[in-house]
Image (spheres, grey):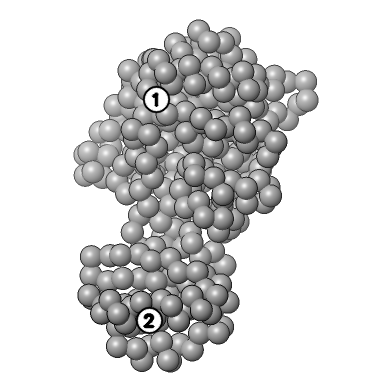
Amino acid sequence: MIIVLKSNPNPEQYEQLKKWLEDKGLDIHKTQGIHSTILGLVGDTSKVDIDLVSAMEIVDTVKRIQEPYKAANRKFHPLDTEITVENTKIGAGHFAMIAGPCSVETEEQIIGIAKAVKAAGATMLRGGAFKPRTSPYAFQGLGGDGIKLLLEAKKETGLPIVTEIMDLSQLDLFEEVDVIQVGARNMQNFQLLKELGHTKKPILLKRGLSSTIQELLMSAEYIMAGGNEDVILCERGIRTFETATRNTLDISAVPVLKEKTHLPIVIDPSHSTGYSKYVKSMCYASTAAGADGLIIEVHNDPAKAWCDGQQSITPAAFEEINRGVQLIREDVLKL
């Protein structure tokens, strides 16, 4: 349920309404707009008499929300969410360029790539320390040592780091990580999502391989219900019958999500296509569709990458893509 208050509501009447709602066991999410104040109610709203609330002097309208997700719902929070990550922002007009290797390999490799992508316009550094792999015999990442190397790269460049958590047992290792990524395979690991809801770190939540948009938003809701409202959604391609690409990038998810939620949305063109030759065009299409950022795999020598080299681009290619993205934002979107 949402309650829209009239302009400049009487403070005393507002406090009375707030206390009355809280006494009914409801959580109140307040959004202060330019012309109105919106109260999003989470909990058992069947106890609330809509007619009684509507008759209150400070209330403009009252509406019941049918969607099962509340905190992530744009009806609760009409303005786009802006998330601050160290010295950069994403959402509400701020665009993030997240770049780095699929996997952290060596100190020289990660620091070299970090410097290269920063010079090319990256605002955050991605890199896998723990790697979910289809084959148990494939490289699984350096684990805690990989996170230490990412932190060294951050010291060298100042770029905030984004890396994936695989299991709750690893959470202590992520104390200094700036953005915790939840991969597609863990999108519905609800116990993990609940625990991340109690952290104070932004969470980058990837859409599952066969998950609907509503299921993605419900997973975001698990995190937000725990008190952590800094959730970044990521469209990384879904599984279809098509085999020409690794997955099928759902570009239409961007406008659909923009309509349904206030959370920032980034696109992963690397995992979705699986081939470096398609990354540039998908970056441009995603930007034109209104995405809030891109997360791209960049490697200084893709042919020798320990993981996913076929979908990784070079720093020079990333620099070219960044220039094109900025032109689209300036000339097409007028941002």
Q: Residue at x 56, y 55 (%)?
A: 226
Q: Is residue 307 visible?
A: no
Tag 2 secondary structure: helix
Q: Which residue is mark 2?
A: 16
Residue 242, image x and y in percent? 62, 40
Q: Is residue 185 above or below residue 304?
A: below
Instruction: Name the amino acid type tagged 1.
Output: Leu
Residue 249, image x and y in percent? 52, 41
Q: Which mark is residue 159?
A: 1
Quadrant in the rendering for residue 4: bottom left
Q: Which mark is residue 194?
A: none
Question: How many labels, in total?
Answer: 2
Q: Residue at x 54, y 17 (%)?
A: 149
Instruction: Name the amino acid type tagged 2.
Output: Gln
Q: Which of the two discs, 1 and 2, labels the residue nearer the N terminus?
A: 2
Tag 1 secondary structure: loop
Q: Residue at x 42, y 35 (%)?
A: 294
Q: Residues within 10 Å of mark 2 (few under 14, many from 20)?
A: few
